[in-house]
Amino acid sequence: MRNLDLKEKLYKHFGYRQFRQGQEEIIGKILEGRDVLGILPTGVGKSLCFQLPALLFSGSTVVVSPLISLMVDQVKQMKAGGLKSVIAINSFMDYKEKRKVLEQLDQYSLIYLSPEMLQNKSVMYHLTKMHVDLFVIDEAHCISQWGHEFRTDYLKLSHSIKQVGNPVVLALSATATPEVQTDIKEQLARPEMDAVVYPMDKVNMSFAIEETASHEEKLERITQVLSHNKSPTMIYFSSRMWAERISEELKSRVDQRIAFYHGGMEQMDRLLVQQQFMNDQLDVICCTSAFGMGVDKSNIRRVIHYHFPSELESFIQEIGRAGRDGKPCASLMLYTPGDYHLPQMFIENELVKPEDVEGILHSLYDIVDSQDSILNDEEIAEELKLSETQWNFIKYQLEQEKLVNHHPNITDKHEWTRTAEKIRWILQNRWKYKNRKLQEMVSWLHHPDCKRKKLYSPFQPETRTPEVACCSNCGFRMEDMKLDSEASSVRFTDDWRSRLAKIFHQGDYHATD
């Protein structure tokens, strides 16, 4: 399909006259029948890379996405734009609703699923009965065993792709080092995938890193920054407790609309906070990493980190939510010497210690051997005193050794001992990797030269010249940043009106005050 035709289709279906960075190249390759690994920075519209082809193909497009809220949001956006043949199959559907959807699954051109839902036998049965043109993996770094969002069901996707007839594959991510890109291709058994990699450095973002002596000093600094300019701001925390605590403290110090968000909240409360922030009814969100993925809010001006994450990839993902409109934005990282134990604690909660593996497998063998009925995953994890992530990792390794088929099987106990040795070796490597990633993060915090160049150096050979002040090591201070909150509000309103006009196919819309 010629470039002109693609732009005509883009305007017809989405109302845009031009593609953003990387979109046209990726879509062109997909339509030529080539597998693509697309590495595009956060905020450039990666979803369009599969949404437009889905409308052009005669069959269906399957999209594997890690978050239900992200899937539901994209489905709502497409339906609001008049594109009805889209569905998200998730665990919140009741039995009758899911059965009805599955019975008419071939009527949908775009089908969103989680990697876990794709392992559902009924879902896979219906997918194998239809024609799938394109198989999409969003947040594709999760495929990599060494990626920063390890999800075991992502590692089963190569088998799922074969089951649905080996369609064209598109893997998308905003943060993947060359090492992870290679691992993604290997895990998908597609070493010849075309890699379309664009620079991820944000030329409209300034970076500030400040060491503080205490949490009280952090709070004082955030109060100063928020008071200096009133503009949409995200503040990231490593724990739910701190997100709630600082949210309440800031409410008493700053005359702004502030709320907290984390994964421990009720779903409706999370959705309410997210929508209020999207609609400019909240100024500041105090959140954990549970908030942000898929949040398409163009006028976020600042991302503040109260705690630093355990990997540069996570940091780049989180700051990528600011400045999607191309206007100046800033990242502020605050840290105290006492913060260093937090990411280490999270690594320990995610990974089993190598020296504990043999004891865990022996206990699991004894538990299964003594039970009259099959225990579910939650019960097994509780019996073994493992977190959900730890048990999922152990279970996946047992599945690879054919010792587990959804539930542990009783086989030769010596086979379990041999498997324990293999898992221990895998974990030793994983501990080294995780601690290396944490050290990269810490090294960046203390880097004496340009923070921008150091931040992006593991991902790309060069960084572009920024359009704004560079970083605190190059002379930038948060007080140097001038923000026009009224302009932000107007931009959001105009965006809202434009989207409404597109829904009713009114063409170009000119607002009058």
Image (cartoon, helix red, strand yellow):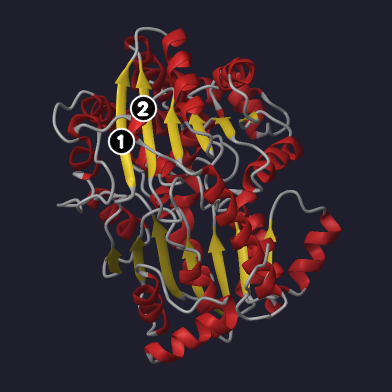
Which tag, 2 or 1, sits closer to the chain's start?
Answer: 1
According to the picture, the residue beneath numbered tag 1 turns out to be: 207
> Regarding mark 1 in the picture, which secondary structure is present there?
strand
What percent of the width, then of the height, locates residue 396? Answer: 47, 41
Asked whether the viewer can see residue 60, the reply is no
Tell me the residue that label 2 is attached to.
333
Question: In this image, 37 relative to 267: left or right?
Answer: left
Q: Residue at x 45, y 86 (%)?
A: 6
Q: Are marks 2 and 1 in contact (CB under 8 Å)?
A: yes
**Residue located at (82% from left, 53% from top):** 94
Going by the numbered disc 2, the residue's amino acid type is: Met
Can residue 313 be seen here? yes
Lateral position of residue 253 relative to residue 463, left or right: right
Residue 111 versus residue 479: which sits nearer the camera? 479
106 up-or-down from 493: above or below: below
Label 2 to label 1: alpha-carbon separation: 8 Å
Horizontal and vertical percent position of residue 389: 51, 32
Q: Which mark is residue 303?
A: none
* Residue positioned 41% across, 77% down in the render: 27
Image vertical order of residue 267 relative to residue 489, above or below: above
**Residue 507 left/right relative to 413:** right
Q: Amino acid at mark 1?
A: Phe
Q: Residue at the spot x=47%, y=76% of the render?
A: 167
Image-based side of 369 in relation to 311, left or right? right
**Quadrant into which the C terminus falls:** bottom right
SS category of the residue bearing label 2 = strand
Question: Looking at this rendering, what residue extends furthest in the front direction?
Answer: 513
Q: Nearer the viewer, residue 505 or 440?
A: 505
The N terminus sits in image quarter:
bottom left
46 and 59: which is toward the camera: 46
Place of residue 201 in the rendered image (x, y in percent of width and height, measured from the top left): 28, 50
Q: Where residue 63 appears, x then y in whole percent?
A: 55, 64
